[in-house]
Image (cartoon, helix red, strand yellow):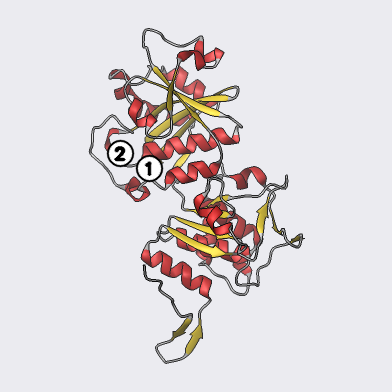
Amino acid sequence: GDVVLLTSLGYSPSGEMFNVPSEMLAAVVAAQLQSSKLVFFTNGEIIQGETGSMVQSLRVSDSLKLLDHWGLENAASTVIDPRMLSRAASLGPPAASPAAAAAPLSVVTPASGAAGVDLESAASLPKLIARSVYACSNGVKRAHLVSPEPGELLQELFTRDGSGLLVSADVYEGIRAAVPSDVMGIEEVIRPLEKEGMLVRRSRAQLEQEISEGNFWVISRDGGIVACGMLKAYGPSAEIACLAVHPRYRRSGRGEVMLAYLERIALTWHVESVFVLSTRTMKWFEERGFRAVDVSELPEERKSSYNADRASKVFLKKLETPRDVDAEELFWNVDRMWNVSSSSSSMP
């Protein structure tokens, strides 16, 4: 129950005194403590998309691109290592984030209606985003940038939609759209599960067709495929299929990461719900927000190809906002993603 107050005054080895910006101090201390959350109060600014909607969620990769776009690395008081900004050029496209859908973006202060990017104020939104990037790149799971208005902090932390901007660590590094040369790697992941009857058999031609239509995603590591997943739209719904993890990497969080990534892609497609067909991993999907429904609730096009002999159970999940996916990630131990597991469990 103790509250620790840290002074912003620091001393050099020679005894010279410095005034360290409190926002920078907070980011560094949060990283050292490996905090789950870091909260900054803004000057009331928000990031606004082209349609006027407020952007409420950014990944570190998206944040780096925004900072690079704003030219923050050239500001007189750069707040993060410029080498981090150089990563933006090598990062893939944003992971279905609102930033990608809402570009171009602008910084707006709703109270005054003023628009523009303030790079000088210590508490300006771009500066706080930069400090959030530093924290989330060094062990902090998420940073909340909240207006100081009464009730905003409670709304941000205890409601589904929040009130401010959430910057969160990247858990999608290594995920990309599959390309034709990935087919053999995908087969290595899914063939054992097909032999066990857990996945429907797909020929190489079918895999190549789905890849060419942009329905397949993979997680790659050191040039190999360690997990895959497929998302196929049927009107207002989409099917998640072929979700599989290489046996060496099961129980490492990659199944959850791929599932959440596909849900984010579905949100950008304006899909209202996703569904899966499963014969053995029902509990795994139920624990991640899916509920069992009758086959009759399948889209007509998918219902016509349903294999009654296989008797797969149908599980449906309603999609709300990216912030809902963010909330689910709180329950992941993301750090374990990169640990190799020898478990042979059938769960992703």
Left or right of 288: which side holds 176? right
Q: Are marks 2 and 1 in contact (CB under 8 Å)?
A: yes
Query: At 41% from the left edge and 64% from the top edge, which residue is drawn?
Result: 31
Q: In which quarter of the image is residue 193?
A: top left
Q: Which residue lies furthest to the right in this view?
A: 113
Left or right of 345: which side holds 181? right
| Residue 82, horizontal then vertical, whole percent | 53, 66
- What's the amino acid at mark 2? Tyr
Location of mark 2 (residue): 249
Q: Nearer the viewer, residue 117 or 156?
A: 156
Residue 142, above or below 50: below
> Which label number is shown at residue 221?
1
Helix, strand or loop at label 1? It is strand
Which quadrant, please, contains the N terminus?
bottom left
Q: Is residue 121 shown to the viewer in this render?
A: yes
Query: At 39% from the left edge and 18% from the top edge, which residue is drawn?
Result: 313
Counting other residues with Cα less than 10 Å from the Cα at mark 1, is it few (<14), some (14-19), or many (20 or more)?
few
